[in-house]
Amino acid sequence: MEKPGRNRKAEIKIGLLGCGTIGSGVFHLAVKNKRAIEESAGRPVRVSKILVKDFDEPRPFPADESIMVTDPGGILEDPDIDIFVEVMGGIEPAKSFALRILNRGSNLVTANKDLIATFGPELIEAASKTGARFKFEASVGGGIPLIRPLEESLGGDNILKIMGIMNGTTNYILTRMSSEGITYEDALMEAQKLGYTESNPESDVAGTDAAHKTAILSSIAFKKGVTQDQVYREGIQSIRPEDLENARELGYSVKLLAITECDGGGIYARVHPTMIPLDHPLTSVSGNFNAVFVIGESVGELMFYGQGAGSLPTATAILGDVVNIAGELGTPLASNRDYWLRPADVRSIGDVMTKFYMVLKVVDRPGVLAKIAGVFGDNDVSLESVVQKGIGDSSEIVLITHVVRDENFRRAREGLENLEVVLEIPSVIRVEGETAASH
């Protein structure tokens, strides 16, 4: 809220909660781009206080120690701060601080995807009750503008589907596996050496990071509150170099995709490895880049592409929110996002309709294909393509199904695992779209 009696051109003071990788980037850009920020905001903007754990903690960019405090109360209760920026990460104490700020009507910007994806409705409700301005553009896609375009530029359209590469670490790993034929373990080791992962990469490779972002985008796109525990997730740990080679032969690439779509009121939100056609725009997104493909009922297909993480890209998005709030102060609140409080009907993964790629290692003898086809037929699964590769006393069968209900495929897989002629099912990957050859 605008402080009583404050001049429209008065300086905006920022209270920065955290000064690590992202926070020091925010301070650095606030100083470096001071003039541009002031012109965009219509008034001066300055970081006036910084909350830190330790004055001597390592930082990518230097910050002004004279404005640092270690006591949370020394910044949270400062009446002169106009906008708080939370870049601490994690759930606590970030959640407690955020609620403390919003419950008294102070403005908040955060980059904390875990917080928004888990407690979005509670935070939105707190902001709505007090009229606080609450923005979190940097929580999804780092420096890629996503949330504001979805809410504002596409606010007059019906979003049908969002499909994107929302984790740069996994995209780098799959890119290296595909281009060099190396194993998942070797590609992960490379990513860790380059600093693309946390010390524990589990959140990235298991799809948790992308699921948090999917929950946020689902809530905004479909105007209902979706939380991260409602998003199905499956990681890339079981992807083999052979799968990437098979995909190329079949006209596909493999990406860890976040997919959310709305059909008849129900929302299908999922994160998993996905085969997409080689001519799909997302196929060309390589390395640690992110891209999000949005399909609107009227606008058609759009793609947002860029660096999805990193200190300065994320800091840029944060300062964009600061500028946005600074420009709004003194005016009526445009939206309090009350839609986030509506419960979402998020459907089970078993209800999703999609194609599947599957590899089976089987005994090489007559009648095997007939038994496999029988199991698929019993579960209403039809096959689009089947390729058999001999490997000594056993064979490898590579197949792609037609579009099928996920639950039907799961039952068929269980049936195949119980067949004595099936030695192993090393790979199962969902498939989106059509191959280039079939267009």
Image: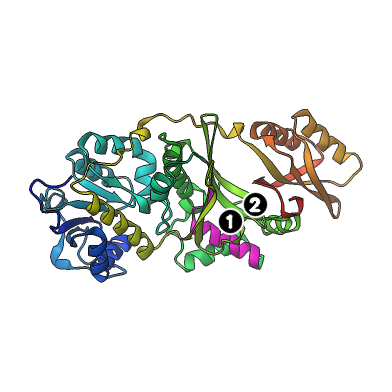
Rounded to the nearest angstrom, the CA distance separating label 1 from label 2 is: 8 Å
Q: Is 417 in front, or is 296?
A: 296
> Residue 182 in the image: x percent, y percent?
64, 65
Side of 278 where 326 appears, left or right: left
Q: Circle 1 sits in a helix, a strand or a loop, which is it?
A: helix
Residue under circle 2?
Answer: 276
Q: Residue furthest left?
A: 5
Side of 24 where 434 appears, left or right: right
- Identify the main secondary structure in magenta: helix
Q: Circle 2 sits in a helix, a strand or a loop, which is it?
A: strand
Q: Is 373 in front, or is 290?
A: 290
> Residue 159 in the image: x percent, y percent?
50, 41
Start and end of the magenta stretch? 160-179
Q: Amino acid at mark 1?
A: Leu
Task: Give the vertical position of 67 relative to 148 (above or below).
Answer: below
Residue under circle 1?
Answer: 282
Determine contact: label 1, label 2, CB under 8 Å.
Answer: yes
What residue is shown at x 47% (from left), y 35% (from top)? 230
Side of 319 where 101 appears, left or right: left
What residue is shown at x 18% (from left), y 47% (from top)? 330
